[in-house]
């Protein structure tokens, strides 16, 4: 089953990723990908969908979905290095997967989040992603 990054949430101050379940009176109900526990996050929690995140490159920005796909091409079926890996190891990985990343705006701390998210999606969901542009074409009525 393909992963819809528009429904995968990162919450400020919380470790791990969450699957959006429903809107609640005060925010959103989500389920942790790792242990399936449900949580109610307040609207002020700093909730971001992975679909909305981009990585800075020298040419502009690249959507996180494309970064995950490029990491998968480089890593194959192997896991990404841990976020505890040496900064040089993370930089080398991103230099292979995304050679034109902007080192002045895409920091090692960002790389750590991306590899953690990549490994969590690989373990708990899928690295095959729903393409929102293809879905929009499917929903366009035929004339």
Image (tube, rainbow, N blue to C red):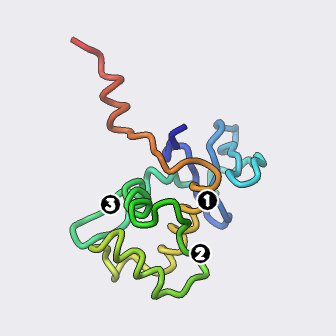
- Tell me if label 3 and label 1 are in contact, CB under 8 Å: no
Q: Residue at x 42, y 81 (%)?
A: 91
Marks 2 and 1: CB-CB under 8 Å?
no
Seen from the viewer's position, the closer of residues 123 and 8 is: 123
Q: Position of residue 11 (x, y in %)?
A: 62, 59
Kindly identify which residue carries mark 1: 120
Mark 3 burial class by Cα count in 10 Å: few <14, some 14-19, many 20+ = some
Q: Residue furthest top?
A: 143
Name the image quarter holding the N terminus: top right
Q: Residue shown at 56%/66% (left/top)?
A: 79
Answer with mark 2 or mark 1, whichever residue precedes in sequence.
2
Q: Which residue is mark 2?
A: 82
Q: Are marks 2 and 3 in contact (CB under 8 Å)?
A: no
Percent across and percent down for residue 78 are 53, 65
For the residue labelled by badge 1, is the local secondary structure a helix, a strand or a loop?
helix
Q: Earlier in the sequence, mark 2 or mark 3?
A: 3
Quarter of the image with the C terminus is top left
Check disc 3 and report the residue beneath it. Answer: 62
Q: CA distance from mark 3 to mark 1?
A: 20 Å
Residue 129 at what x, y percent from top left?
45, 45
Q: Is residue 47 above or below residue 90?
A: above
Residue projecting furthest to the front: 77
**Left or right: 137, with 132 as reference point:** left
Q: Residue at x 61, y 64 (%)?
A: 12
Give the residue drawn at x 39%, y 74%.
94
Q: Nearer the viewer, mark 2 or mark 3?
A: 2
């Amino acid at each position: 089953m393909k992963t819809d990054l528009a429904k995968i949430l990162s919450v400020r101050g919380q470790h791990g990723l969450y699957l959006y379940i429903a809107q609640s009176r005060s925010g959103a109900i989500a389920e942790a990908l790792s242990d399936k526990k449900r949580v109610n996050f307040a609207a002020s929690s700093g909730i971001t969908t992975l679909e909305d995140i981009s990585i800075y490159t020298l040419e502009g920005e690249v959507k996180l979905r494309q970064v995950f796909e490029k990491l998968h091409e480089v890593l194959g079926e192997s896991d990404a290095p841990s976020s505890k890996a040496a900064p040089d190891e993370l930089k080398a990985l991103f230099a292979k997967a995304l050679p034109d990343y902007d080192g002045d705006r895409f920091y090692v701390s960002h790389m750590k989040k991306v590899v953690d998210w990549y490994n969590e999606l690989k373990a708990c969901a899928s690295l095959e992603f729903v393409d929102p542009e293809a879905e929009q074409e499917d929903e366009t009525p035929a004339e």
